[in-house]
Image (tube, rainbow, N blue to C red):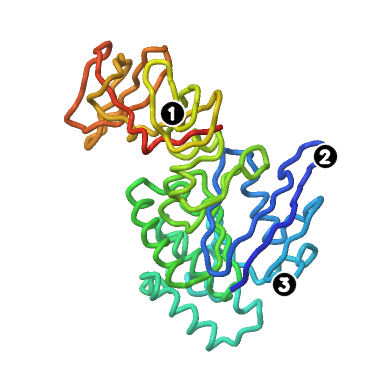
Amino acid sequence: MSSVTLEAITKTYGEEVAVDGIDLRIRDGETLGVVGPSGCGKTTTLRTIAGFETPTEGHVRFDGTDVTHVPPERRHVGLVFQSYALFETMTVRENVTFGPRMHGVGPETRRERADDLLAMLDIAELADRNPATLSGGQQQRVGLARALAIEPHVLLLDEPMTGLDAELKRRLRDELGSLLDDLDVTALYVTHDQEEAMAMCDRIAVLADGRLQQIGSPADVYRRPENEFVANFVGTSSLLTGTADGNRVDLGFTELEVDTDATGEVTVAVRPTDVHVGGPIEATVVDATFLGERTDLAVELPDGTSATVRVDGQYQPAADETVSLGIDADRVHVLE
């Protein structure tokens, strides 16, 4: 295992800036998720760590050693792509032993290593199959086994669950998260799916326009977003404008006692579960979406601001109905 440090990494393509001055550290043995919209620099960051991209500025370090100009084959990095990139002219076992063979590992050792990994991933019976005959979930496991077979110092996963159906993705998300914990491998997990990152990763880094917006535990990033972009991108937030004075924020239509030292105009990030039915705020239902266990309400607040409210699925008010709401002040987060 290795720690990975990115120091002021910038990558440009002509006049286009793909990554803009990113400072980032992946701790030894942790799984760091990188999330953000398309074009935010997620994959460029991963490819820079792998050695497929050389930064225009900055340094990449593994355990403190500068590897910025070290070629990919000498970085000892395992890669899992969204396409899995399996060799269809080889069996599953041959796919898994390919990396160790390229690293000079003897035939007996690499076969034993492959069989151990296939057994650990519960696909031992597929060893002699052609990858083209496997399901998406099975191919994903083969791709992971192949990446782990070289015993990498760092494991890089680039959107590995793209294209899988929702139920399989949920199951594999739990299994892969547990496996990464058991392996104690240093991993970077790139995804556009915030729930996937929160469920599987020790910490999350949020990127936008090539810049790091926030890094922290899933709970910190969700409950205490550092700016409006993070509040909107990670989960759902209603952003309400108010005036802070001491530990009180006046939203115009209600006041909240909050934990803040801010004064003057502020933005309050309110998650859908921070609002409950029954309270002093009279809101108008714009739309109600029934989702089984819950109903998501789009409401208009007294000042005309839109907000999202999550309530029990048995509660299904009609459009244009007036509902009484309250905001749990101890759950909201103030953005200065």
Q: Tell which of 253 and 239 is nearer to you.
A: 253
Q: Give how far apart the Cα atoms at labels 3 and 2 are.
A: 28 Å
Q: In which quarter of the image is residue 258?
A: top left
Secondary structure of the residue carrying tag 2 is: loop
* Nearer to me, 9 or 55: 9
Please identify the quadrant where the C terminus is shown.
top right
Q: Which residue is drawn at 74% across and 71% down?
A: 65
Which residue appears at 57% of the width and 45% of the height? 206
Return the x and y of residue 301 as percentages of the image width and height.
37, 16
Q: Name the residue under label 2.
A: 14
The mark nearer the N terminus, 1 or 2, is: 2
Viewer can see residue 228: no
Instruction: Look at label 1 and name its amino acid.
Output: Arg
- Direction front: furthest residue: 246
Q: What element carries label 3?
A: helix
Mark 3: give few (<14), some (14-19) or many (20+) Cα within 10 Å.
Answer: few
Tell me which residue sits at (58%, 73%) in the image: 1
Against 187, residue 226 (above or below) is: above
Residue corresponding to mark 1: 248
Mark 1 or mark 3, earlier in chain = 3
Which residue is drawn at the image coordinates 27% and 30% (left, top)?
Answer: 276
Give amino acid for label 3: Arg
Q: Name the amino acid type tagged 2.
A: Gly
Residue 166 is situated, as x and y percent measured from the top left of the image, at: 36, 46
Residue occupied by mark 3: 74
